[in-house]
Each structure stands twice: as structure tokens, then as C-alpha cells.
Image: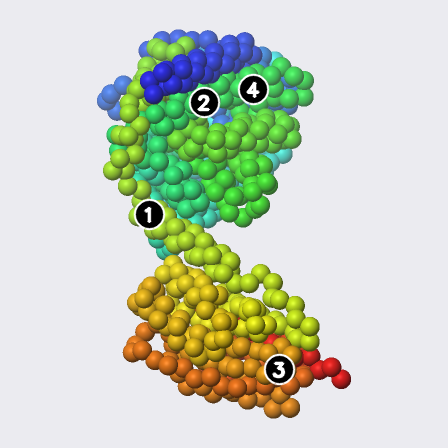
Amino acid sequence: MRTSATPRKAALLLWSVAGLLACALGVALASAFLPEWRAGEPADPALFRQRYRELAAQAGFVLDAGEPRAFLTTGSKPAYETFRPQGDDAAARLLATGSAYEVQIFHRVRAPGGQRNGRFGVDFSLAGRPLVAAWWSERLNPFAPRDPEANLRLAEKLASFLLRPGESLGSPRQEQFNNLWRLTVPIEGSSRPRHLLIYAGDAISAGRLEGDVTESSEMSLDNGMSRVFAVVLGCILAFLLILGLFLVLAVKSRLSVVNGALLALAALLTLKPTPTITLGWQEGTILISLWSAAGIFFLWSSAESLLRSTDPGFTTSLDALRTGRLGPRGGSALLVGFGCGAALAGLRLALLSVAEVLPGFWPTGPSLHLPLFNTLGSPVAEGISLAGGVALAMALAFRLLPLRWAPAAAAIAAGILLSPLHLHPWVAELAVNSAIAGLLVYIARRYGLTALLTTSLVSSLLPAAAFAAQHLHWLPGGFAVTAGVPAVVLVLGILGLSRSGIAEVERLNPPGFVRRLEEERRVKHEMDLLARMQRGLLPRVLPRIEGYQMAAKSVLANEAGGDLYDALPDEEGYLWLAAGDVAGHGYSCAIAQAMTKAALASLIGRGRTPAQVLERMDVVLRAAGPRRHFTSLALLRLDLGSGEGVLSNAGHPYPLLAAGGEVLELEMPSLPLGQGPPRSYEDRAVRLPPGASLVFCSDGLFEAADGDDSLYGFERALTVLQVAAGRDADRILEALLADWRHHLRAARPLDDTTIVVLKREDLQ
């Protein structure tokens, strides 16, 4: 075992190194082409804080005690996109304006002019020039009195901070949406078209943007708010759909929540609920963080439970990792995930770099979001969400679609809905994201859910770690987390390979619903085997006999029962026709059924009558059969030339004889074989004239109940046979079964139903 494990461990370590090399190549390309990677190290935080204090004093704010918070931040996707209408030199413009990423500083302040106390924040370019200035209330209160004029005055004061020497404000365009004002103001005296976008309400902000006023005014305030509401509504609907799926699984008792809860907690610890210029009040950021963590909990728990319902062992290695029983299987998944995640991180950076270089293509957002850990997201939350989304897409696709289409459908759906990369044009974005999602689907199917989770996490963490390493002065904590988690994954993977595989599975109990599903699958598999065994005991083809027609069919109920029939010739030229039913269900019933057929084949003939055969079969079944089973059996010995026969019955429903325009029950009261006191049976002479039919039916026909618990009964079968007696044997059989099914309607039969028809042809 040790000799085989060593090459495997070496191969996995080589794969991890190869992934790191691919990641390093992606970082090198990003450092050469992506603006946020080329921007360099900003100045010391103390210089930005000093400039912030100067602006706060100019605005009339009094800062509370303590040091203002300073951190690196990337702009939103719309702000990033404002550079794109200028052409393919957007990266150069981002670098020239020092806006590839920014320094944001805010602190609690006491506001001037009767405004409520709140926070004052400024976004600085890397060159130390203000790009955004904002004030927002400490707690938003919709019932608090408002002073629109004071808000506008403060907005104008903040806007003045954003002007460069020689610049001035032009005539503003003004819009109002409820209590929110939006002003679009051109900047005059600028070397390129620029303008300010000002919002004044409970929160007041002024931002410096590229382009002229018309470009910013193309979207009205109403349309802008409508888009915001549409995005929020989409997030709420997605949350509710996932919550609905979660509740459905909970109602069906097919839910596992432990891993989902732990991953949601890990994500919550990295979703730092800190108010910012874009988010404002403290309580809101806490609610958003809790909302995001709850979404991850519902998403992961639903996806994992659906996958485990399909394959009970799908996440065994994840359970082993959680319970401290990591072994070779989990170690392999971690190392595979580490190597794939590192390679995927390099691929994502490389694709963004290529899009930055190719004409007509560009990234529509930054390659990573700063601060690394904030209310709206983190590399940890992003990686878990990506893995959970792919897992859920897989689970739904494999349940709803044919197997050959499911992987592609899951990849496309995950690519559209999750969008790990943002590119222009949208066709390129769809193709790239579907390819990335397809890779994750393959990893999940090939290596399991642990490898998928590790791949997604590492692909999100390593670029952040590489960026933080270049800005350790600003991001020491971010580097420790983003580099530390992949390092822990790598160490755990190596340790897992070195441990015994027994520790990984011993005493590792899957969730209760998985054990229940395994038991249901086992029972279903056994019932399928039993049903095949029972069908194998029935004759594949009935013998063809000149002058006679035979038809038989056995309809299995939910569980395999013991109905049987057979047609056997003996050495004296007689035809023996048997129809019976072994009471009960399960393997012991099938064994008794097989014994009955074997005893029947060995006892017929030799001058015996049907009654004598039944008496000897009773002895055999009592000696060797299961004590709790009894067998009903109707047995006919027929002289094919004359149509004269001898019939005996051991507790089976009375055969039906249709002859001469009448249908009769051949009553022969008797007890079944195999139980009770020793018994004897009687023979009854029967005759099948030309055109007559003899029909054997099991009790499943007569005792079938519809939805109102009304039984099919004997009289109904007699009526159908009266009408269909002149037909061929096959059509008589189908007439009885069709009427039986009509009676059942949507109800399912509780017992097997067998019909055997023997018809003597009318030679006239």
C-alpha cells in the first residue's frame, strides 16, 4: 500500500505545483495589462488621513475621537464602466487618473448646520486627489424632519472638494425622486469632458466621473432607481426560490444542514459589516451580511442535500474533514481542488488580461474587489457561493434532464446566473463563464463536492493573496487570510494522504435522511431482483397446441408476490394446466413459489389425478416450505383429443367455464396447501366442448379496490366473460384486464393479478 500511495502523493503534489505555476503566469499577465495590478503602491495611509482631516475641517465637520479608517477600494461596475466609452485606452485613463483602485477614508463626525450626526467619507485617487465625497446619517430615520436646502448646500460644499485648479462648476441638471435629489453638473475648464454626479437626501454624495453630462443623463433618476430596484428584486426572488427549495427538502425530511451552517458561518466571519460611502448605516450593513450568510446556508444545504439524495457517498470526504477523520480520499480531493483552483485563478486573470488587450473586448469590472472583506462580499463568500451555485445547477439538471444533456445544461445555467467573469461583449462573457462552470461541473462529477468547494475557494483566494502581497503595507490582514486558507488546504491534503483510509470511514455516520434513502434503495433493489426472479419462474412462451388457444398474463403489484401459472405435458399425452398463488411477499414467498413449481413438474403424470398430485404437493410443502406461507393451486389434467378433463382445487378462486352461451363458476370448496391439518382433495370431471373457454383468475382480480374501496368482485368478471366468450383467448384476456383497469382508475392494485385463459377452438 505504501508503494502505491507514494507515486499518487507525488503526482498530486506535482499537480498542485503546476496549478501554482499557472496562477503565477496569470498574475504576471495581470501585472502587465490590468490597470488595478499596474497602479502601484499608494502613499502612506497617514498622508491620506491628513488630507481627509483637512477636507472635513473645510466642510465644517467635527471628527469624533479616534483614527479615521483608511482602506483600499475598487469602484462599482457602473463607475468602472464610465471609462469605456472613451475607447480601448480605458486602462490608460484609469492609470492616468489614479482611479484603478482608490483609497477610502471615513470617520464619525458631528455635522454642521443642524444636520444629524453621521459619517463623512472620501475616496481618494492614488495620487491623493478626492474623487468621491459623501456624508450619511448614522441611522436612517424616514420620520425625521428634513431640510432640503441644507442638504443641497452640503452637497455643493462636498462637490467643491472634487474640482482641480482651474476648474469650475457649470449649470446643473436637476431631478427629484421622492426625497432624493440628483444633480448632474458639468466641469468647466477640464482638459477632457468630465462632470459631477451629486445625490442629496438622507445620504449626500458627490462623485467625479469621466465623460460629459449627456452620457450620465441618458439614464434618468427614475430609470436608475428602477434598475436598482430590479437588481434588488432579482436577488430577493433568487433568495426566495432557494429558500422554497430548502423548505421542500425540509418537509420531505431530505435535508442536511451541518456543512451548510459551517460554511455560512465561515462566510459570515469574512463579511465585515462596516458602513461605507456606498452602503451607509451600520444596521443596514449588518443585515446585508446576515442576508448573504443566510443565502449561502440555504444554497449549500439545498444543493448538498439534492446531490446526496442522488449519490449518498457524494460528500463523504467533506464529512470526514468536518469530523476530523480526513484520510486519503479527502486528501486527494483537497490537493486536486488546490491544483485546479490555482490553475483556474491563473486562467481567470489571463482571460481578463487578454480581453484588455484585444480590440473590441474589455473587462466590465475589476479583477478583484476591494476591500477584500466587506459587507457585500469576500473571496471566501465568493468561492463558497460559486461552488454552491454550480452544485445546485448540477443537482437540478441531473434530476430534470437526461443524463447526456445534464452536464452541459448545468454549465450553461451556472455560467449565466453566476457570471464569475465580467466581459464585453456579452457573448464572450457567456462563452467564458460557461466554460469555467463546465470545468467546475467536471471537477465535481469526477472528484466530488470537496474538490469543487476547494477549487472555487482557492480560485478566489489566490488572486487576492497575490494582490495583497504587493500591498502588504495596506493589506496585512487580508494577505494572512487569503494566503493562509490555501496553505491550510495544501497541508491538510498532504496530511490526509499520509493517514490510513480506515480512519476516514469508520464510525462516520451520514445524515439520517441519507441512511433512510440507502435503505429505500436497498429495498427497491431487492424488490426489483425479486420481481425478476418471479417473472423468471413464469413460462416465457406457452405451448402451441393444435385445436386450442392459450393466453396468460401476470400483473405485478407494488411488491413481488407469489402468483404462478404453468402448462406442462406429461408422458401419457395429457396437458396439465396450473394456476396458483403463494401467500405473502418477499424472498421466502419466491422460494415457496419455486418449490411449488418444482414439485408440480416432478409429480404430474405417472397415472396420478390432479387431486393425488395436490395431496403429495401438500406433503412436500409442509416438509420443506416456509411455515408461514400457504399456497392455493387449481390444477387441470386435460385430454386434448376429447376435451375431457379432471380438475382439482386447493383453495384457489373458482375457475370460470364459458360454454354453450353460459358462464359457470366451477365450485370446489377446499383449503390451500402447506398449512393446517392433513387434508385430501377431490377430482371433478370437466369438459371443454368446441368453442368453450376455461379461465383461471387469482384473487388479485376479484379483490382489486378502486379509490372508494369498492371491490371488483366476481359478478363483474362473469359479466365480462359472458360478453367476450366468443372471442379468441388473447382478446378474452385483454377484455378482463381492460375492465379491471377501468375499475381501478387511478388506484394501484395491492396484490398481483394473474389470468390464464384456455380456449378450445370451434372447428365449424
Q: CA distance from mark 3 to mark 2?
A: 81 Å
- Name the residue beneath numbered marker 3: 643
**What's the residue type where badge 2 is placed?**
Gly
Query: Of 644 and 94, which appears nearest the observer?
Result: 644
Query: Of 610 and 538, which appears nearest the observer?
Result: 610
Q: CA distance from mark 3 to mark 4?
A: 89 Å
The local crowd at label 1, few if under 14, some if 14 to 19, many if 20 or more residues have their Cα within 10 Å, is: few
Q: CA distance from mark 1 to mark 2?
A: 32 Å
- Name the residue beneath numbered marker 2: 341
Q: CA distance from mark 1 to mark 3?
A: 59 Å
- Name the residue beneath numbered marker 4: 352
Residue at (57% x, 32% y) in the render: 434
Pointers 3 and 4 in contact (CB under 8 A)? no
**What's the residue type where badge 1 is placed?**
Arg
At mark 4, the secondary structure is: helix
Locate the C terminus by quadrant. bottom right
At mark 1, the secondary structure is: helix
Question: Residue 269 location in percent, x, y?
Answer: 30, 30
The local crowd at label 2, few if under 14, some if 14 to 19, many if 20 or more residues have their Cα within 10 Å, is: many
Pointers 4 and 1 in contact (CB under 8 A)? no
At mark 2, the secondary structure is: helix
Sequence-wise first label, 4 or 2:
2
